[in-house]
Amino acid sequence: MRNTWDRIRHAVGFEVVGLLIFAPLASWAFGYELHEMGVIGAVASLIATGWNYLYNVLFDKGMLRYTGQLRKSVPVRVLHAVLFELGLLIVFLPSVAWYLGISLVDALIMDIAVAGFYMVYALVYNWLYDIVFPVPSLKAQAKPEGAAIG
């Protein structure tokens, strides 16, 4: 399983790279000023960073409990990304509507588009992260026989 430092590096990297892509793309796609999309992105990033850390810990513990390992197949990676984005959608919908002064329906349409972007981004980012920073094997993390428990 990943250690705390690795999870922090993962979450911060995810949010920084995502924000650098999101703000200009959303500004262009939705017709709002770059600073408006930047504020939405930055606030969402702070909330998403905390959710990212908690969600990935819970997801990994669930995988270990139900499968006994942490290797993610393509379907599991897709499920991972979809569930992550659904959690964020519930939090972001009212705040985006309020900040931009738009209806909940318009905010939902915008959030679905943003969630679609972030699902693809999360899938690619997490896959590449696992390649660049592979999960240590469970055997390597196990204490040798006779090691002191501390």
Image (spheres, rainbow, N blue to C red):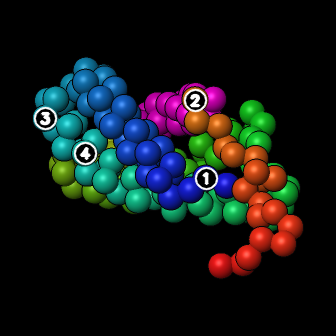
Residue bearing the label numbered 4: 42
Q: CA distance from mark 3 to mark 1?
A: 35 Å
Q: Amino acid at mark 3?
A: His
Segment colored magenta: 112-131
Q: Are marks 3 and 2 in contact (CB under 8 Å)?
A: no
Residue 52 can be seen in this image = no
Q: Which residue corresponds to mark 3?
A: 35
Q: Is 115 part of what is drawn in magenta?
A: yes
For the residues labelled 2 and 4, the Cα–Cα distance comes to 26 Å
Residue 134 found in image quarter: top right
The residue that appears at 29% across and 29% down in the rendered structure is 20
**Of the image marks 3 and 4, the number of the one nearer the N terminus:** 3
In the picture, the disc for residue 85 is none
Left or right relative to 149: residue 99: left
Residue 37's spot in the image, x, y percent?
Answer: 22, 36
Three-letter amino acid code of the residue under disc 4: Ala
> For mark 2, what is the residue?
132
Secondary element under disc 2, as helix, strand or loop, is helix
For the residue carrying disc 1, how many other residues have a C-alpha within 10 Å: few (<14), some (14-19), or many (20+)? some
Magenta run includes residue 44: no
Q: CA distance from mark 2 to mark 1?
A: 13 Å
Main SS, magenta region, reads: helix
- Amino acid bearing label 1: Arg
Q: Position of residue 95 (x, y in %)?
A: 28, 56
Indicate the secondary structure of the residue bearing disc 1: loop
Q: Is residue 76 above or below residue 32?
A: below
Which residue in the structure is indicated by mark 1? 2
Q: Earlier in the sequence, mark 2 or mark 1?
A: 1
Q: Nearer the viewer, residue 126 or 41?
A: 126
Q: Amino acid at mark 2?
A: Val
Q: How many marks?
A: 4
Above or below: residue 31 compared with residue 8: above
